[in-house]
Image (cartoon, rainbow, N blue to C red):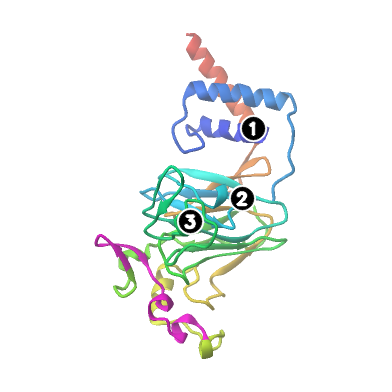
Amino acid sequence: MCVLFLLEIYLFVVGLDWRGNMASTPRGSLLFALALLCFLSGGPRRAEPARVFTIINQCKTTIWPAASPGDSFGGGGFALRPGQSMVFTTPVGGWSGRIWGRTGCNFDASGNGSCETGSCGTKLKCGASGEPPASLAEFTLAARDFYDVSLVDGFNLPMVVKPVNGEGNCSAAGCDGDLRENCPSELAVKVNGRTVACRSACDVFDTDQYCCRGQFGNPSTCHPTFYSKKFKAVCPTAYSYAYDDPTSIFTCSNADYIITFCSNRNQSMCSYHKNRLICSGSSRSWPIMSILMLVLLFSLSSLQFSVL
């Protein structure tokens, strides 16, 4: 609990609250007092979580991320406004599942509604996989993690997965291009004249060749097609067809993961790992004691100005 207070205090120092909004000074001062009290009293400690997932929306519109299984991810679904992020932890022992984004959703106060893309029935909190087309982040977490971003079921949002502070290759996976902008007309999903998603050739034509089944159901006979090559050109580190393994599946150990919608694979992202704020693409990290000292100095400075 102390760790969470201190992390929120750091976000306050840089001017943001948990939801990505500007933090107010009275709220920040109160949180600082609570965090300092918790720290000095040696509050209860929890076991280190298996993995930390930070999900960020850098799109221009609200999206509704979903996860399956979703017990560790807000029950399987939630809303993220532009610039917002949410942090989740998977249970000790690993997690295997998928995360995707939904667009154009409208849910009532009871969590019932519909989406233009990525729907999992009529619920905000998904209990099953989303309806294609949808960009998917797939994970199998163990002593050695496997992860990828798959467009085999189509594309609805740019999506990038970045491991943080892991061991091994730990490359960024995903797609920072937008296939909706030049989706072939025969694959395009349109709502009110605008393209909201790009279907897979398998979903549209349902042939063995496009679906890598039957006589095409193995790596030696299932090859890139005209359509999968178009997907690969825009998204070089995402799965474009079923056997696109060499350039699309990645491994890492002991990492946390940052999933960003509508971002760039080369953009630095930050998450929280083992009592430190870690940013991708940088060897620099901020320990809790350093954050506490920064907040203390900031708080004293604010108090001095308020007295004056």
Quarter location, residue 299: top right
Q: Compute the Cα span from label 3 to label 2.
A: 28 Å
Position of residue 163 in the picture relative to residue 185 (left or right): right
In the image, what residue type sits under mark 3? Answer: Asn
Query: Total of numbered circles in the picture?
Result: 3
Outermost residue, bottom side: 215
Give the residue displayed 68% in from the left and 51% down from the top: 91
Instruction: Name the secondary structure under disc 2.
Output: loop
- Could you tell me residue 63's position as x and y percent? 42, 51
Q: What are the residue bounds of the magenta stretch?
A: 189-213
In the image, what residue type sits under mark 1? Answer: Ser
Give the residue displayed 42% in from the left and 75% down from the top: 203
Residue 229 visible in the picture? no
- Could you tell me residue 202's position as x and y percent? 43, 78
Residue annotated with mark 3:
266
Residue annotated with mark 1:
290
Q: Crowding near pointer 2: few (<14 within 10 Å), some, many (20+)?
A: some
Q: Does the magenta stretch include residue 219?
A: no
In the image, what residue type sits under mark 2? Answer: Ser
Q: Compute the Cα span from label 1 to label 2.
A: 30 Å
- Could you tell me residue 40's position as x and y percent? 72, 24
Position of residue 263 in the picture relative to residue 60 (left or right): right
Q: Which mark is residue 72?
A: 2
Q: Which badge, 1 or 2, comes first in the chain's sequence? A: 2
Instruction: Name the secondary structure under disc 1.
Output: helix
